[in-house]
Amino acid sequence: MKKYWVFRVIKGVIFVALAVIVFGYVAMHLWNWLVPSLFHGPVIDFYEAIGLIILSKLFFGGFHGGRCCGRGGWQHRKQSWKEKMETWTANMTPEEKEKFREQMKARCGGRWSGFDSEEKPASEK
């Protein structure tokens, strides 16, 4: 059993190293092909390309296990937010719900559809 574990770790390290090398060279060649001619930017080397990849991953993707936008992606976040709003508005009086709806319409415009259990969203009407 232990031999298989060690083999898997070595295989994973080699795969990650190869991926870093390939992505680094691809990023470097794309940058050096496009940026200097289009934007009169600098030519970069391999290590700067790796730095750009890491920086862009931090800014735009994060390090969250490979899924888009965290656990379950955008649909999961949207559903989670909707459930929180439904729970929150369920404890409101009808007057509070109407006041909240008006405030959200003022802030968000026509995109806002309330989260009442009595009302269906505009897309389901």
Image (cartoon, rainbow, N blue to C red):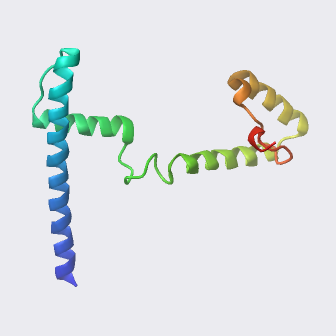
Which of the pair 92/77 is nearer the observer? 77
Residue 57 appears left or right of 1:
right
Q: Quadrant of residue 113?
A: top right
User: Does 37 appear above or below 21?
Assistant: above
**Residue 38, percent from left and from top:** 22, 17
Q: How many marks?
A: 0
Q: Nearer the viewer, residue 74 or 40?
A: 40
Q: Nearer the viewer, residue 92 or 59?
A: 59
Q: Looking at the rendering, in which quadrant would you find the N terminus? A: bottom left
Q: State the image coordinates of residue 55 (x, y, percent, origin top left).
A: 27, 35
Task: In the displayed orientation, state which residue is furthest to the left.
Answer: 45
* Residue 88 percent across, percent down from the top left: 74, 44
Quadrant where the C terminus is found in the figure: top right
At x 86%, y 46%, the residue is 118
- The answer to which quarter of the image holds residue 34 is top left
Which residue occupies 89% across, 33% down?
95
Residue positioned most to the top: 40
| Residue under the image location 32 percent in, 40 percent down | 57
| Quarter of the image where one finds residue 110 | top right
Position of 5 with respect to 107 (left or right) is left
**Residue 25 percent coordinates (x, y):** 14, 41
